[in-house]
Image (spheres, grey):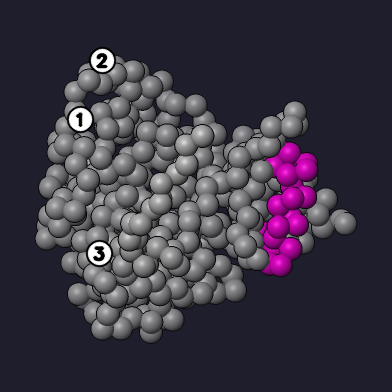
Amino acid sequence: MSTEPSENIRLRPVLEDLPVYVPGKPAADDGMRRFKISSNESSFPPVPAVREAVIASLDQMYLYPDAAGTALREALGASHGVEPSQIALSNGSVTVTADLVRALVGEGDEVVYAWRSFEAYPLLVGGHGGTPVQVPLTASGEHDLEAMAAAITDRTRLVLLCTPNNPTGPSLSTEQVEDFLATIPDHVVVGIDEAYREFHDPATVLGTAGIFRRHGNVVLLRTFSKLQGLAGLRIGYAVAHPRLATALGQVGIPFAASRPAQAAALASLDPEVQEELERRAEWVRSERSRVLQALTAQGWELPVSQGNFVYFPTGERTAEFAKFADARGLVLRAYGVEGVRATIAEREANDLIISVGAAWRER
């Protein structure tokens, strides 16, 4: 039997304390039907036109994708009212965020973000040698922008605002973000992560287009993983001002956006597909409202979510609640001793969220 050779390699010391990303828990394979609503995936099948675009792209799978993403960047630039050169593509908004960190953050530089927020933030910052500065959310699961502004120092290079916030759900208003930007140095970049923007109430959604036009230190982060349902293909992008857009191109991984992913994203921008996606978004908003109203009537005090999920602030009983739900057919995302997130999925799963919530409170 062969033995493993000794590894005398020298890893970067920062990896010793770096947390590992924990994906949504998979459903147990024990014969019981379970709804896996732990990963904020779309519960809808691919839009037919998008699926057809992906299939057609496979005929050229032996060729590298367009590294510049020319057609997609032109379409996204037109959509956002910017030059195509201001669109930075990669394989998911998390990778675009990593590019943003690489472009801005050196050893010991600080990145400020709310906590708890997107699980990847500490990994992206710490993995590149930056110092994460985590500012606790308010009791209602919202960003504490005053505290975040106070946490900025001479070493701060980047602030990340996740709105709607994952995993708690509350969002930031245009006024809140404008007030925040007015209080911080304009050399500190503010990345606005809007992975769940499409699920927000359209009447009150953050006016990021205007914010971006007014502030040269703002960059927008978007994904096709959620409403568009392209999580498995991996594609996302940033909208940046010219100097930062150039920097993102310098640090980005070549060919990161695959040919099928670019084809799917481009097809997703077709007006008829957009209409179908908006119908799906409205259905999710309606179901989210129904679930939140039912849970509130049961006595739950939950954050006001604008994402495609709801959040139970279960504290020390988080693991117990997740296990309780799993035994009844719901696989949820547990966060330490803080809370549990449940994705709004098909109606049967949403009904089960309500019944599990009721059963827990009746114990």
Closer to the eye: label 2 or 3: 2
* Relative image position of residue 175 (x, y in whole percent): 37, 70
Residue positioned 22% across, 20% down in the render: 62
Please state if 261 lies on the left or on the right of 330 as rendered: left
Q: In the rendered structure, find residue 218 and report the number of the disc placed on it.
A: 3
Q: Which residues are magenta?
A: 312-330
- First in residue order: circle 1 vs circle 2: 2
Furthest toward the right, the residue is 363
The correct choice, above or below, for 126 with respect to 197 in the image is below
How would you rate the neighbour count of disc 2 (Cα within 10 Å): few for under 14, some for 14-19, many for 20 or more? few
How would you rate the neighbour count of disc 3 (Cα within 10 Å): few for under 14, some for 14-19, many for 20 or more? many
Q: In the rendered structure, find residue 59 and report the number of the disc placed on it.
A: 2
Residue positioned 26% across, 15% down in the render: 59
Is residue 301 located in the magenta-colored stretch of the structure? Answer: no
How would you rate the neighbour count of disc 1 (Cα within 10 Å): few for under 14, some for 14-19, many for 20 or more? many
Amino acid on which the number 3 mark rests in the picture: Val
- First in residue order: circle 2 vs circle 3: 2
The correct choice, above or below, for 180 with respect to 268 in the image is below
Residue position marked by numbered label 1 in the rendering: 65
* Relative image position of residue 283 (x, y in whole percent): 54, 38
* Circle 2: element type: helix
Please state if 352 lies on the left or on the right of 145 as rendered: right
